[in-house]
Amino acid sequence: MSYRTARQSDPELRFSDTEIRDLAIAWVTLSIAFALLFAPVHRGKSIGAFITMVGLSLVTVGVAFLLHEIAHKVIATEHGQIAEFRADYQMLFLAVMGALVGFLFAAPGAVYHRGQVTQRENGLIALAGPVTNLLLALLFLTLVILPEPFGTIGQMGIWINLFLAAFNMIPFGPLDGKSVLEWHKGVFAIVFVPTVLLAAYVIVFVGPFR
């Protein structure tokens, strides 16, 4: 997700210590939350299975989240914005608590950007995250035919990236889809419709892992 605020000039693509800390905390916390959802050690799954799922989540969920947010930052900077990711610690806590009861709402934070941009530029900044997830899903697809553990990593990577792309393209509130829809209804439809259909198929009929 990305948010737009007030103006700054002469932006550069760089990461502050606070931003790196927030990205790292969100990466690890999200990975633990997904591991609790898929391998609930508190509901009888072995510690070994949980630790394995944490590792899988770091590679799949973590990378999907990290590159989604960096994509927002890169495109925002290219359009003259000052952009930094900030974690939402309250939502990260709720993600872990939700995973413990079998439900996960992942909204770990957002890239906040400030500066003057057109509606088109704001739409492109928002679109960068979901499109990055779609490209990552294609990348993970190449792993599915390989032996384990690469096959499981590939399948889980496809699942989570399609889920994140579809979720963030919902045209509601602070989600990316709202900014894309406000900019161009045609672009929104071209990305949103096939993404939701693919995500629904993979989630319902394939599953996150073997």
Image: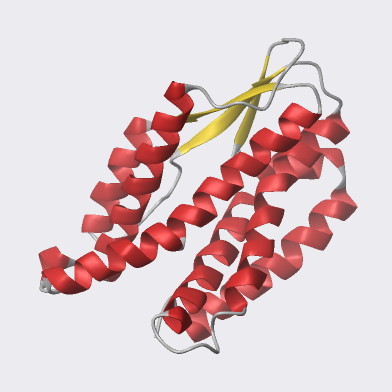
Left or right, 104 with reference to 199: left
Vertical placement of residue 151 versus 193, above or below: below
The structure residue drawn at horizontal position 30% and vertical position 42%, both measured from the top left corner, is 94
* Above or below, comparing residue 119 to residue 9 in the picture: below
Q: How is the image coloured?
A: secondary structure
Residue 105 in sight from this viewpoint: yes
Q: Is residue 157 left or right of residue 124?
A: left
Name above or below for residue 52 compared with residue 1: below
* Left or right of 198 on screen, residue 92: left
Q: Quadrant of residue 132?
A: bottom right
Q: Position of residue 129 (x, y in %)?
A: 66, 47
The N terminus appears in which quarter of the rendering? top right
Q: Is residue 175 visible?
A: no
- Nearer the observer, 12 or 115: 12
Quadrant for residue 102, please give it: bottom left
Q: Looking at the image, which is closer to me, 77 or 127?
A: 77
Judge whether 150 appears above or below 90 on screen: below
Which residue: 28% across, 54% down? 32
Q: Position of residue 9 (x, y in %)?
A: 76, 10
Q: Residue sitting at 60 percent across and 40 percent down?
A: 70
Q: Residue at the spot x=69%, y=11% of the render? A: 6
Q: In the rendered view of the protein, which quadrant contains the C terminus?
A: bottom left
Where residue 51 appears, as percent x and y from the top left, is 22, 65
Dividing the picture into quadrants, the one containing residue 35 is: bottom left
Count of picture labels: 0
